[in-house]
Image (cartoon, rainbow, N blue to C red):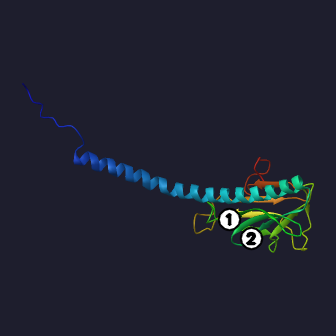
């Protein structure tokens, strides 16, 4: 009976080469993964704000009452029915999945917008400035400005709310009008 002296498995050299190849591939993938995560945070923040604004509009139409969308400076947004009680419909924390996102409000002092029973944007009861635009981005310390995909939420007096890309070419489906 013959015994086969060959051994099965990896040698130490083969294992070190495999580990080196994996390490190189990871080193190449990390920068693009960081960019992808930062842009995902922008998208998450934008979608969350858009959802809140659309919720306020839908509730105003459904209840046939004035509903207020308030963008808080730190914590997020709140939708409440404008009545004597100011009943809160829903509230969200802004940092849910988008802690690094920066939101710039236009006009700069605006914090809320009010929808009427027809879903149109109306003057706020407290006569404060009405939100017309929100720009969402990330700090340039996180990723380079050229790699960032900022988003913008625009509204008009008819109640239309749109999430768009301010850097998209004119005529593209995602371009801001």
Task: Judge from the rendering whether residue 72 lies leftward or rightward of residue 11; answer left or right.
Answer: right
Q: Residue at x 75, y 50 (%)?
A: 174
Task: Judge from the rendering whether residue 37 lies leftward or rightward of residue 170; answer left or right.
Answer: left
Q: In which quarter of the image is the C terminus?
A: bottom right
**Mark 1 or mark 2, earlier in chain:** 2
Q: Do the residues labelled 1 and 2 touch (CB within 8 Å)?
A: yes
Q: Residue at x 36, y 49 (%)?
A: 21
Residue 176 in view = no
Crowd tier of the residue under label 1, counting other residues whose Cα lies within 10 Å: few below 14, some 14–19, many 20 or above? many
All told, the count of numbered labels is 2
Q: Assign a secondary structure to mark 1.
A: loop
Name the residue nearer the viewer: 16 or 162.
Answer: 162
Instruction: Give coordinates of residue 97: x percent, y percent.
Output: 61, 60
Residue, disc 2: 72
Q: Residue 106 carries which label?
A: none
Name the residue nearer the viewer: 125 or 162.
Answer: 125
Q: In which quarter of the image is the N terminus?
A: top left
Residue at the extreme front:
85
Residue at the extreme left:
1
Residue, disc 1: 94
Res. 6 image quadrant: top left
Instruction: Give coordinates of residue 92: x percent, y percent.
Output: 70, 63
Res. 64 image quadrant: bottom right
Crowd tier of the residue under label 2, counting other residues whose Cα lies within 10 Å: few below 14, some 14–19, many 20 or above? some
Q: Residue at x 34, y 52 (%)?
A: 20
Res. 52 image quadrant: bottom right
As measured in the structure, the alpha-carbon distance from the residue carrying label 1 to the one carrying label 2 is 9 Å
Task: Judge from the rendering whether residue 169 lies leftward or rightward of residue 159; answer left or right.
Answer: left
Instruction: Give coordinates of residue 43: x percent, y percent.
Output: 67, 56
């Amino acid at each position: 009976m013959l015994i086969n002296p060959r051994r099965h498995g990896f040698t130490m050299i083969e294992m070190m080469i495999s580990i080196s190849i994996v390490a190189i591939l990871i080193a190449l993938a990390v920068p693009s993964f960081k960019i992808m995560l930062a842009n995902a945070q922008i998208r998450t923040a934008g979608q969350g704000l858009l959802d809140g604004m659309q919720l306020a509009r839908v509730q105003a139409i459904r209840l046939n009452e004035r509903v207020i969308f308030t963008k808080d400076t730190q914590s997020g947004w709140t939708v409440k029915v404008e009545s004597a009680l100011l009943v809160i419909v829903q509230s969200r924390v802004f940092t849910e999945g988008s802690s690094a996102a920066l939101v710039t409000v236009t006009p700069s002092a605006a914090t809320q917008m009010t929808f009427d029973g027809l879903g149109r944007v109306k003057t706020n009861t407290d006569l404060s400035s009405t939100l017309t635009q929100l720009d969402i981005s990330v700090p340039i310390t996180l990723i380079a400005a050229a790699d960032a995909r900022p988003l913008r939420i625009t509204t008009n007096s008819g109640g239309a709310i749109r999430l768009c890309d301010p850097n998209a070419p004119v005529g593209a489906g995602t371009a801001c009008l």
